[in-house]
Image (cartoon, rainbow, N blue to C red):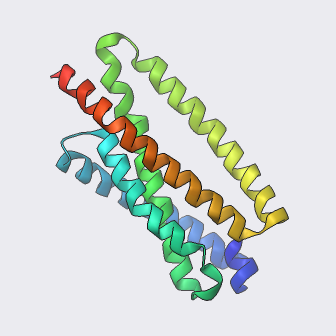
Amino acid sequence: NILTETYGASTSFTLILSVLLLFLNIVAVSFIVFIYRKLGRNEVKTVLLMGILALPLAVALIFYESMPMAVATVLMIVITMAFYSAGQIILINYPQRFYSYGLTAMIGGLINCFAAVGNVVASYGGGFIADNFGWRVLIVIWVVLIAVFVILALIAFPVWRRFLAKQK
């Protein structure tokens, strides 16, 4: 755990943070549903906003060793909340857009499949990278992945907007 290895945080403290994160993610989902509605119920625009929020925070996190533990912890929590809530928007709302094509279940299943594979790869791959190359390398990989996510969302945005216009 980055907090234990870098700052000497106790295991019980990091476990309490994990439990706290579960509750904070509920708040994040409530917030993103509000944002989603304000942005015209556009899934790509909403998750793009979360990526744009998370990217500079992840870049700042590269320098975690020179910041207080509280700052690094808040950065990690906000990044996690942004992507958890974005994932919920994709998981819950995106498949419904394909109802008229008879593809709701297939799209939902594919998203769940990719999410499950992503969780496994992130858990084991992230641990391997942190153990063998250090936390900074893992955080740089996160930054690159978030940047790729933002670029892909920017590319998808006009396509998604046309798709939504056809549904009205």
Task: Classify the position of the N terminus by image quarter.
Answer: bottom right
Residue at 39%, 62% in the rendered image = 53
Q: Give the farthest residue toward the top.
A: 102
Q: Is residue 45 above or below residue 11?
A: above
- Between 19 and 116, the residue placed more toward the observer is 116
Task: Classify the position of the C terminus by image quarter.
Answer: top left
Q: Give the farthest residue toward the left.
A: 168
Residue at 69%, 85% in the rendered image = 7
Q: Horizontal and vertical percent for residue 5? A: 75, 78
Q: Horizontal and vertical percent for residue 107? A: 46, 23
- Between 113 and 164, the residue placed more toward the observer is 164
Q: Horizontal and vertical percent for residue 102? A: 37, 11
* Residue 23 visible, this orientation: no
- What count of labels does the image hold? 0
* Residue 36 visible, this orientation: yes
Residue at 20%, 47% in the rendered image = 39
Q: Is residue 31 above or below residue 114?
A: below
Residue at 45%, 60% in the rendered image = 81
Instruction: Tell me: 12 left or right of 57.
Output: right
Q: Horizontal and vertical percent for residue 19? A: 56, 65
Q: Is residue 115 above or below residue 64?
A: above
Instruction: Tell me: 96 left or right of 25.
Output: left
Q: For residue 138, what is the image quadrant?
A: bottom right
Q: For residue 153, what is the image quadrant?
A: top left
Instruction: Tell me: 107 left or right of 61.
Output: left
